[in-house]
Image: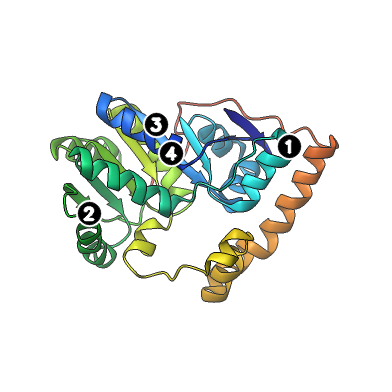
Amino acid sequence: MKHSVLGVLVDATDYDRATAAVLDAAREGRPFALTALAVHGVMTGVQDRAHGARLNSFDLVTPDGQPVRWALNSMYGAALADRVYGPTLTLRVLDRAAAEGLPIYLYGSTDETLDRLVPRLQEMFPALKIAGREPSKFRAARPGELVEIAERVKASGARILLVGLGCPRQEVFAHAVRPVLAMPVLAVGAAFDYHAGQLRRPPEWMQRRGLEWLWRLGLEPGRLWRRYLLLNPAYLARLGAQKTGLWKATPPAPTTDPAASVPA
């Protein structure tokens, strides 16, 4: 079930249900878009209502960050015991895909990261079929390029597309490509970097207490300080206003119009 967290519709789900939803769509060959949102992802939809409408059109939005899970539990009694973290969900999906012989396609990041990621995934899941891989172009897609990318994915025989472009670029891409791909499209955030061994995971105690942002801020202060030191307090303030009724977080209606420059 979807619930409004500052106007962004997030599903009160867990790893098992999210994984099953992805695999069902892959087996049936139908469009399905998923993203895992932490505070930063939610706030992108709050600050840009067009992007919020885009997020609200996703089939599944998981509570990637503990503060998002806490919001679902506090406001809606969701009783979620854990978040549904993008990198962990990715491994669960890949495990099932390998077991069922469903090929995957990796789109995004850099060639260097993909060179490290592919052998690590094959080591973890020897039966995994990687139908194709393609790095980001780090620019806006030219006219017609999105369809060309989709055709390459389809021609590869892939049944699941994993997108690692970073927030919010990956959500813009997944939203735009969903109508032309009959398969699940998963916006998996930093999963490529984590599983390629290029980002260190925080200790488990920090993850449980919602302090992953502090760990990442310590690793990349110059790039991430605005994201965490400005957006986190804004998220908490708005959440308090929503919960007490001082602010009505009206969700923007879902949209099928990309209404943005699609990244490639």
Residue at image x 55%, y 48%? 83
Q: Earlier in the sequence, mark 1 or mark 3?
A: 3
Q: Nearer the viewer, residue 28 or 37?
A: 28
Q: Mark 3 points at which residue?
A: 21
Q: Measure the alpha-carbon separation of dots 1 and 3.
A: 25 Å
Q: Do the residues labelled 1 and 2 touch (CB within 8 Å)?
A: no
Q: Which of marks 4 and 2 is nearer the N terminus?
A: 4
Picture layout, residue 174 above or below residue 111: above
Q: Is residue 11 left or right of residue 248?
A: left
Residue at image x 39%, y 31%? 21
Answer yes or no: is residue 262 visible.
no
Q: Mark 2 points at which residue?
A: 125
Q: Name the residue under label 4.
A: 16
Q: Where is residue 28 in the image (x, y as percent from the top left)?
A: 27, 24
In which image quadrant can residue 47 be found?
Answer: top right
Give the amino acid at mark 4.
Asp
Give the amino acid at mark 3.
Ala
Q: Measure the alpha-carbon separation of dots 4 and 1.
A: 23 Å
Q: Do the residues labelled 4 and 1 touch (CB within 8 Å)?
A: no
Q: Measure the alpha-carbon separation of dots 4 and 3.
A: 9 Å
Q: Which of marks 4 and 1 is nearer the N terminus?
A: 4
Q: Measure the alpha-carbon separation of dots 4 and 2.
A: 19 Å
Q: Name the residue under label 1.
A: 75
- Mark 4: give few (<14), some (14-19) or many (20+) Cα within 10 Å: few
